[in-house]
Amino acid sequence: MKTIDEMLHLDLLTSDQHAQIGAWIAQAGSADEILKMPAPLWLALERASAAMGLDQDLARNPQFDEIDTLWP
């Protein structure tokens, strides 16, 4: 939820999209249920994620000095 809150704060999601996505996640009992989110909501999340560069962050290799902070 923190990520979609940030997307709302950055005006990457509308208040309505934020509310619908939050409600969907809250009622979902599993990751599989989240994946069944309606296509327009997924599209909004994909656009917001791209604008935030989330895919790039997840795909990059960590720097060696970051590894020590992740696993002390």
Image (cartoon, grey):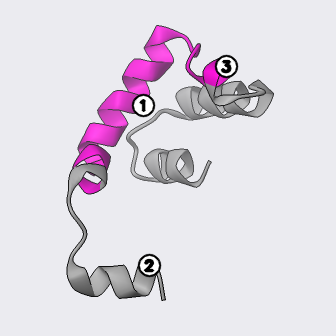
Q: Residue flagged by tag 2: what amino acid is it?
A: Leu
Question: Which residue, given by chain and number where applicable, does mark 1 sit on?
Answer: 45
Image mark count? 3
Residue 41 drawn at (x, y percent): 49, 19
Where disc 1 sits, the SS reads: helix
Q: Which residues are magenta?
A: 32-57
Residue 60 drawn at (x, y percent): 20, 57
Where disc 2 sits, the SS reads: helix
Question: Which residue, given by chain and number where applicable, does mark 2 sit on?
Answer: 70
Residue 45 drawn at (x, y percent): 42, 31
- Residue visible at 44% across and 78% down in the picture: 70
Q: Residues within 10 Å of mark 2 (few under 14, many from 20)?
A: few
Which image quadrant is residue 24 in? Answer: top right
Where disc 3 sits, the SS reads: helix
Separation of residues labelled 1 and 3 (CA atoms) = 16 Å
Q: Is residue 47 above or below residue 62?
A: above
- Residue visible at 40% across and 25% down in the picture: 44
Residue 60 vs residue 20, the one in the foreground = 60
Q: Is residue 22 above or below residue 71?
A: above
Q: Residues within 10 Å of mark 1 (few under 14, many from 20)?
A: some
Question: Which residue, given by chain and number where applicable, does mark 3 sit on?
Answer: 33
Residue 58 vs residue 9, the one in the foreground = 58
Compare marks 2 and 3 and give the one earlier in the sequence.
Answer: 3
Q: Residue flagged by tag 1: what amino acid is it?
A: Leu
- Residue visible at 49% across and 32% down in the picture: 14
- Residue visible at 65% across and 31% down in the picture: 19
